[in-house]
Image (spheres, grey):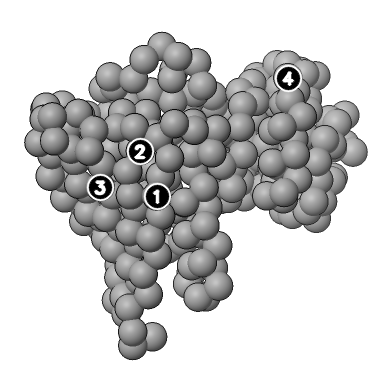
Amino acid sequence: MIFITVQNLCNNCGFEPLNIPFPNREIKGGYCGDLLSWVMGRAGEDNAWITIMSNINVIAVATLADVSCVIFSEGTRPDDEVLSVAKEKEVNLIVSPLNTYDTAVKISGYINE
Amino acid sequence: MNDELVFHFDVDGEDFTSAGQASVMVKKNLRRLGLSPEIIRRVSIAMYEGEINMVIHAGGGVADVKVMEDRIEIVLTDHGPGISNIDMAMQEGFSTATDTIRTLGFGAGMGLPNMKRYSDTMDIKSTVGVGTTITMTVNIQ
C-alpha cells in the first residue's frame, strides 16, 4: 500500500475537493456507511469515509471518529450550512460522482496501483 | 496531573443540529492535555453516543467529564422517559428511535453498544418516568 494523501486521492481519482483544510493528511484505508453510529463505532482513524449522508451530524461524526476525509458519493453535496461548519471544524470534504461501491473500487485501484 | 479536571456541559435537547458539540469540546480539551489519540478517540465516541441519546430520547441533559490521574469519567444525566429494559437496549440493532431520526442516520441501535465498547466500565441507572444516569470510565494507560 502506498502513502496517499487526501489531495493525491482527489487528483488521481477525479474527485472534487469541496473543503480541504488538510490536503496532506494521510489516508489509511476506508469505510463505507450511512448509519452514523455504525460509522462511529467501526470506521478507523485516518480512514476515508464514503457516504451519501450529508447532514450536519456527519461533520461531528467525522471530527470525533478522526477520519481523514468524508467522501460524498453519488455526487451528493452538503448544503451551505453544513459546508460552513465543516470549514469551521476543519473537516476534509470531497465529492465523488460515482456511487459508493464504485468510489471504493476506484480508491482501492489507486492504492494498489 | 494531581488535581481533577472537570468539564460540565448542558446538552440542548431541542437543537438536533448542534448535537455533538459537547463531545467536540471534550475532544479539544483532552488534546490540549496531551492524552494519547486512542484514549481521546474512545472518550469522544463514547460521549458522543451518550450525547446523541440524550438529544434523541430525553430532550437533553447534562454531561460531566472528570479527568483523573488514572482515568476519565463521563457522567451523563437526563430526566427523560428512562429505559424500561436495559438488557434489550444494550443489544446491537435495538432502537426506539423514530423514522425522522433514522433519516438523519441515527437509530441504528448502536449507541449504547458503542458506549460499552469504547469505555472500560459502564453503569446505567434508569427509572422509567424519572430519567437515566450513565457513568462511563476510560482508563488512561
B7 or A102: nearer the eye? B7
Residue reaching furthest to the bottom: B2
Say if mark 1 contacts mark 2, CB within 8 Å. Answer: yes
Query: Disc 4 designates what residue?
Result: A76
Q: Of label 3 and label 1, which has the lower sequence position?
A: 1
Please name which of the two marks, 3 or 1, marks the residue nearer to the observer.
1
Residue A32 shows in the view: yes
Instruction: Give the side of residue B133 with respect to residue B42, left or right.
Output: left
Q: What is the C-alpha distance between the residues marked 3 and 1? A: 10 Å
Q: How far apart are the alpha carbons under marks 1 and 4?
A: 33 Å
User: Which residue lies at the image location 44% right of the left edge and 31% below the top edge?
Assistant: B14
Amino acid found under the numbered disc labelled 3 = Thr
Amino acid type of disc 1? Asp
- Residue tagged by mark 2? B60
Mark number for residue B10?
A: 1
Residue A72, percent across and down? 70, 26
Q: Nearer the viewer, residue A16 or A56?
A: A56
Distance of label 3 from label 2 (alpha carbons): 9 Å
Is there one chain holding both mark 1 and mark 2?
yes
- What kind of element bears circle 1? strand
Q: Position of residue A70 (x, y in %)?
A: 67, 36
Residue at numbered disc 3: B77
In the rendered image, residues at marks 3 and 2 fall on the same chain = yes
Give the alpha-carbon distance from disc 4 to disc 3, as whole Å.
37 Å
